[in-house]
Image (cartoon, grey):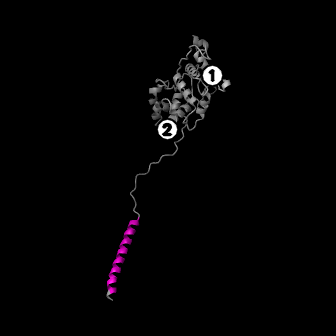
Amino acid sequence: MPVELRMRPVHALAGVACLALAAAAWAQSTPVAAPDNAPVQTAPLVEKPATWGDAQAGQAKAGACAACHGLDGNAMQQNAPRIAGMPERYLAEQLHLFKSGQRTGGLAAIMAPFAGILSAQDMRDVGAWYATQKAGTGVADDTAIAEGPNQGLKFYQVGERLFRSGDPARGLPACMACHGPSGAGNPGPAYPALHGQDSAYVTRRLEEYRTGTTTYTAPAHFKLMAAVSKSLSDEEIRSLASYVQGLHTRAPGTTKESIAR
């Protein structure tokens, strides 16, 4: 009998302890609502598609471009291309390549920060502005070639022949087939204008194409130019560059006689 009396308080204490632990466990498992935070800011995964550019809006957005490309797109800095008169879609495409890090040659390190702040619509607007501008005209080198397979020709004439006729023996199409007889480009497939372009810039771009290597994710245009330029000699590349630098469009209604006057 005394043994039973001594055990009962122990059982009672154990029961109380179990109840306390169960209560604590229940309290810990009860969900507590967190305080409301500010609404989450969302952004679309894909940027809104751009529409045709607004030249007036593009003029306002192109202020920073003037330092290298000039107020009207006729470049002021060496190795910077003339972009006046370029097709809108071509310029927008190149800005995208700079922004996405796909175009890395030449002055890409300078261009990338400026392109990086532009939306797709900004690029089209800037392209539309420069597309309305008139490209200036350079001068082609008419020095006679002293030696080699083109001896006796004026330096630019080698490039003129390639530009107008290509070279069927090498399977080279005429440059004007894509860029037009006057080098004005083609706004449909976004082929660039070439007339009046700085010869040093054209030389560098043709040399880049000739390597045949690119980081473009959509390299169709690059591969087209790589196939054309892979068999060009250094002299032919420089001559082509010289020819297109002196190439220009004739104003509507202009005649040989009016130029003479």
> Is 171 one of the magenta-colored residues?
no
In 3D space, how far apart are the residues under numbered discs 2 and 1 (Cα atoms)?
A: 38 Å
For the residue pair 176 and 53, the one nearer the viewer reads as 176
The kind of secondary structure element at disc 1 is helix
Q: Which residues are magenta?
A: 3-30
The count of marks equals 2
Mark 2: amino acid: Ser
Q: Position of residue 222 (x, y in %)?
A: 58, 32
For the residue pair 237 and 21, the one nearer the viewer reads as 237
| Residue 162 image label | 1
The outermost residue toward the top is 261
Q: Quadrant of residue 113?
A: top left
Q: Are marks 2 and 1 in contact (CB under 8 Å)?
A: no
Residue appearing at x 65%, y 22% in the figure: 165
Residue at the disc numbered 2: 119
Q: State the predominant SS element of the stretch in magenta.
A: helix
Question: Image quadrant for the C terminus?
Answer: top right
